[in-house]
Image (cartoon, grey):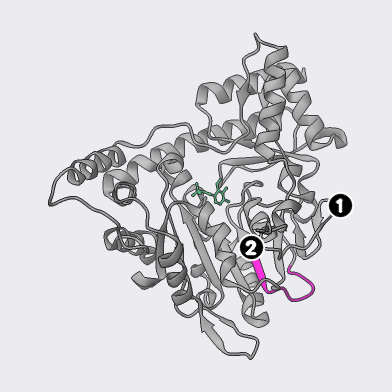
C-alpha cells in the first residue's frame, strides 16, 4: 500500500485566488449585467515588447533548421543568457558573480518553492507576515511548518509587517535557521532600505542563518538608493540565495523564465558541523529534477538586455507605475490609508472602520463591481488590509477608481 504524504493534507483546501474566483462567479451569476473589473490577481495585461517577440521568432526559425535546432539545453541555462544577467543585473551594481552561480529556471515560483529541499526537514523557518504563500506552503508539504493553530503554523516564526511598525519587520528575538525576505514586497508593495537590509545580513552572518531573498519585483524600484539585490550588501554572498523573475519585469508570466543565484561562498552545516557549499548541491538537484528552460524562452529573456529591449520593458513598467500613481492618489483622496505603490506594482490598503479583509472585498464587489485581494489571504497580519494591483490597463484602472468614488459618495 502506498502511503500518502500526509503533510499535504494539512494545507488549507482553499487557494486564495480560487476562493476569490468562486465569490466573483457567484456575483456574476446573480448580477449578469454587471461588468466586473479585477484589480486583484497579480497577472500582467500588457503584451510582450517587440524585442522579445522578434527574438522568439528568430529562435523558432532557428529551431526549424538542422544547424539551429536545440534539444535538451544545459540544466543551469545557456551561457548567452547567464552572461547577459551578470553583465546587466549585477556588474553595474558592483556585484561580481561567477557564471556558475546563476541558475536559469522556468520562473521564480518553482525555485522559491523547491529551494527548501537543500535544508534539513527540522530547520526553523522565519517569514515576514503578510507573505507570498509559496514560501510557507512548500515547507508545509514536507512537514517543516508543523501544524496550523489559529491561522499560524506552529514551527514558523512570523515577523509582522503592519502600519504600526511602518512595514519594517523586527529581527527575530530568537535565532532562526532560515528566513524568507521579499523586496519589493508582494503583497504590501513596500521596499527595504540598504541600512535595514544590512541589519538582516548582519543578523544572518552572526546567527548562521540562511536568507532566501525574493527579488521578483526589483525592476519596479524607482528610488536610486533602494537595493535591487541583496548582494549589494557586503557579506550577503555568505548567507543568501536570491530569486529573480522575468514575469513582472518583462511580461513573461506565460513565457516562463527567471533565475536563481546560489553563491559559491554559501554553506550550510551538517550535524557534525562540517560546512557544505550549497552551490554544487543545487546544481546536482537541478540536473536531477529539472531539464532546463526552453531555448526560445531564454532567447526571449536575453532580448530584454539589448538596448531596445531595455527601453521597451521600461516603457511597460512605466505604464503600470502610472496606474499605481493614479490609484495611490485617488484612494488617498477618498480617505483610505494606502501603502506601497511607489517602488512596486502593489498597493496595500487599510480597510476602513476595522472592516475585515473579506468583508471589504465583498462590499467593494457588490458596491462597485471591483475585485481586490483580501489581505488575510497572505497571512494573519494581512487581516484588515486589501491588495490592489497596478497590472490592469489605464482604462480599467480609471474606470475602477471612478466607480469607487461613486460608491464612497
Ligand atoms: N515571487 C513573488 C513574490 C511573486 O509575487 C511571484 C508571482 O506572483 C513569484 C515569485 C513567481 O513568479 P514567476 O512567474 O516567475 O514564477
The reply, left or right, for residue 308 in relation to residue 131 is left
Quadrant for the N terminus, please: bottom right
Q: Is residue 206 magenta?
A: no
State the residue at coordinates (32%, 51%).
Answer: 298
x 78%, y 30%: residue: 360
Dot 2 corresponds to which residue?
180
Q: Toward the viewer: 132 or 153?
A: 153
Q: Nearer the viewer, mark 1 or mark 2?
A: 1
Residue 144 location (% of width, % of height) = 71, 66
Check if mark 1's residue and mark 2's residue have beta carbons within 8 Å: no
Q: Which mark is residue 185?
A: none
Q: Residues within 10 Å of mark 2 (few under 14, many from 20)?
A: many
Q: Main secondary structure of the magenta part?
A: loop
Residue 290 lies in what quarter of the image?
bottom left
Local SS, label 2: strand
Q: Nearer the viewer, residue 141 or 362?
A: 141
Q: Residue at image x 47%, y 70%?
A: 282
The answer to which of marks 1 and 2 sits earlier in the sequence is 1
Above or below 328: residue 219: below
Provide residue 19's location: percent of width, then percent of height. Answer: 71, 34
Look at the image and tell me whether residue 38 can be seen.
Answer: yes
Question: Residue at coordinates 53% horizontally, 74% vertically from top-left?
Answer: 236
| Image location (x, y in percent) of residue 34 | 65, 12
> Which residue is outermost to the front?
1
Asked if residue 94 can be seen in this view, the reply is no
The residue beneath circle 1 is 150
- Separation of disc 1 and disc 2 at Cα? 21 Å
Which region shows up in magenta? Answer: 171-179
Amino acid at each position: 500500500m502506498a502511503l500518502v504524504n500526509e503533510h499535504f493534507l494539512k494545507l488549507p483546501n482553499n487557494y486564495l485566488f480560487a476562493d476569490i474566483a468562486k465569490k466573483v462567479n457567484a456575483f456574476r451569476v446573480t448580477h449578469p449585467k454587471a461588468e466586473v473589473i479585477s484589480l486583484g490577481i497579480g497577472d500582467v495585461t500588457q503584451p510582450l515588447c517587440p524585442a522579445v517577440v522578434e527574438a522568439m521568432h528568430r529562435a523558432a526559425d532557428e529551431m526549424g533548421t538542422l544547424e539551429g535546432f536545440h534539444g535538451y539545453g544545459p540544466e543551469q541555462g545557456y551561457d548567452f543568457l547567464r552572461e547577459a544577467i551578470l553583465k546587466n543585473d549585477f556588474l553595474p551594481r558592483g556585484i561580481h558573480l561567477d557564471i556558475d552561480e546563476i541558475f536559469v529556471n522556468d520562473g521564480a515560483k518553482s525555485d522559491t518553492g523547491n529551494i527548501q529541499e537543500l535544508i534539513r526537514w527540522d530547520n526553523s523557518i522565519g517569514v515576514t507576515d503578510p507573505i507570498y504563500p509559496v514560501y510557507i506552503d512548500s515547507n508545509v508539504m514536507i512537514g517543516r511548518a508543523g501544524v496550523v493553530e489559529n491561522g499560524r503554523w506552529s514551527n514558523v516564526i512570523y515577523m509582522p509587517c503592519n502600519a504600526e511598525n511602518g512595514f519594517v519587520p523586527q529581527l527575530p528575538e530568537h535565532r532562526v535557521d532560515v528566513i524568507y525576505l521579499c523586496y519589493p514586497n508582494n503583497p504590501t508593495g513596500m521596499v527595504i532600505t540598504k541600512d535595514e537590509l544590512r541589519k538582516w545580513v548582519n543578523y544572518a552572518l552572526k546567527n548562521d542563518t540562511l536568507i532566501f531573498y525574493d527579488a521578483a519585483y526589483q525592476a519596479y524600484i524607482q528610488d536610486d538608493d533602494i537595493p535591487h539585490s541583496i548582494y549589494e550588501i557586503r557579506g550577503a554572498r555568505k548567507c543568501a540565495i536570491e530569486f529573480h523573475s522575468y514575469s513582472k519585469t518583462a511580461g513573461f508570466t506565460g513565457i516562463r523564465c527567471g533565475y536563481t543565484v546560489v553563491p559559491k561562498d554559501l554553506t550550510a552545516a551538517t550535524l557534525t558541523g562540517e560546512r557544505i557549499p550549497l552551490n554544487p548541491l543545487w546544481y546536482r538537484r537541478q540536473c536531477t529534477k529539472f531539464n532546463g528552460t526552453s531555448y526560445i524562452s531564454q532567447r526571449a529573456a536575453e532580448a530584454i538586455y539589448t538596448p531596445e529591449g531595455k527601453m521597451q520593458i521600461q516603457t511597460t513598467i512605466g505604464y503600470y507605475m502610472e496606474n499605481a500613481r493614479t490609484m495611490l492618489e485617488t484612494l488617498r483622496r477618498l480617505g483610505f490609508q494606502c501603502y506601497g505603490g511607489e517602488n512596486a506594482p502593489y498597493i496595500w490598503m487599510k480597510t476602513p472602520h476595522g472592516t475585515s479583509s473579506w468583508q471589504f472585498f465583498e462590499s467593494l464587489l457588490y458596491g462597485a463591481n471591483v475585485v481586490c485581494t483580501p489581505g488575510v489571504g497572505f497571512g494573519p497580519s494581512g487581516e484588515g488590509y486589501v491588495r490592489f494591483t497596478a497590472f490592469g490597463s489605464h482604462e480599467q484602472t480609471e474606470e475602477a477608481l471612478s466607480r469607487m468614488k461613486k460608491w464612497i459618495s
